[in-house]
Image: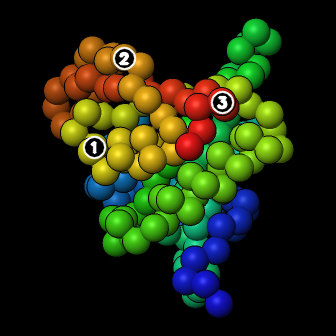
């Protein structure tokens, strides 16, 4: 049996996702706040399981969810060919191929099953490991969003990265 299994998010994953979101290495690189409450996670789970979203998780052979990743289509009709992408990997599982497995699965869905033309994301400039993963899968830096988000007591820039279906590696 493989060390990891990629599968769709299920409602029973809420406790593992809450633990994942509470990890400083995760929330520090996302737009989430520290100390997620059960209510906040329930609301977030409702969105992740909603229409227009594809949310995957990576679980260990023991059944523990250690990472999640998702695609969400943009709501505007003229942007229906575009999806945003987000990925979270618990610090204990970073650098072990989890992100690579999730990205490959998401992009397979995007390219071969959903028919997305463009995927975009934001990433902090100091998150070099994430940027390397995204570049590995054909994402390119398209711009810098100045003072994009508030993190650790200050406003920080974010990089906008995008990938067109024809640009895949």
The percent position of residue 116, horizontal first and vertical second, equals 74, 31
Callout 1 environment at 10 Å: few (<14), some (14 to 19), or many (20+)? Answer: few
Q: For the residue carrying disc 3, how many other residues have a C-alpha within 10 Å: few (<14), some (14-19), or many (20+)?
A: few
Quadrant of residue 156 within the rendered picture: top left
Q: Is residue 84 visible?
A: no
The local secondary structure at tag 3 comes to helix
**Residue ID at (80%, 34%):** 115
Rendered residue at 72%/41% (across/down):
110
First reached walking from the N terminus: tag 3 or tag 2: 2
Is 166 displayed left or right of 158 in the figure? right
Report helix, strand or loop for mark 2: strand
Residue 126 relative to residue 75: left or right? left
Q: Which residue is mark 1?
A: 127
Residue found 25% across the figure and 33% down from its top: 125
Image location of residue 23, percent across then percent down:
34, 59
Provide residue 101's location: percent of width, then percent of height: 56, 62
Mark closest to the chain's N terminus, 1 or 3: 1
Q: Nearer the viewer, mark 3 or mark 2?
A: 3
Tell me the residue that label 3 is attached to: 166
């Amino acid at each position: 049996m493989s060390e990891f299994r990629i599968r769709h998010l299920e409602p029973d994953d809420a406790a593992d996702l809450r633990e994942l979101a509470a990890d400083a290495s995760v929330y520090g690189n996302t737009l989430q706040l520290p100390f997620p409450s059960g209510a906040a996670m329930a609301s977030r789970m409702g969105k992740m399981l909603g229409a227009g979203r594809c949310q995957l998780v990576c679980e260990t052979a023991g059944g523990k969810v250690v990472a999640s990743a998702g695609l969400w289509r943009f709501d505007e009709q003229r942007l229906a060919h575009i999806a945003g992408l987000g990925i979270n990997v618990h610090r204990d599982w970073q650098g072990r191929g989890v992100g690579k497995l999730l990205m490959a699965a998401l992009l397979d869905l995007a390219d071969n099953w959903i028919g997305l033309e463009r995927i975009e994301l934001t990433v902090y400039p100091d998150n070099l490991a994430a940027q390397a993963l995204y570049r590995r899968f054909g994402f390119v830096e398209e711009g810098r969003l100045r003072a994009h988000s508030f993190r650790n007591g200050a406003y920080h820039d974010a990089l906008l990265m995008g990938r067109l279906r024809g640009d895949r590696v």
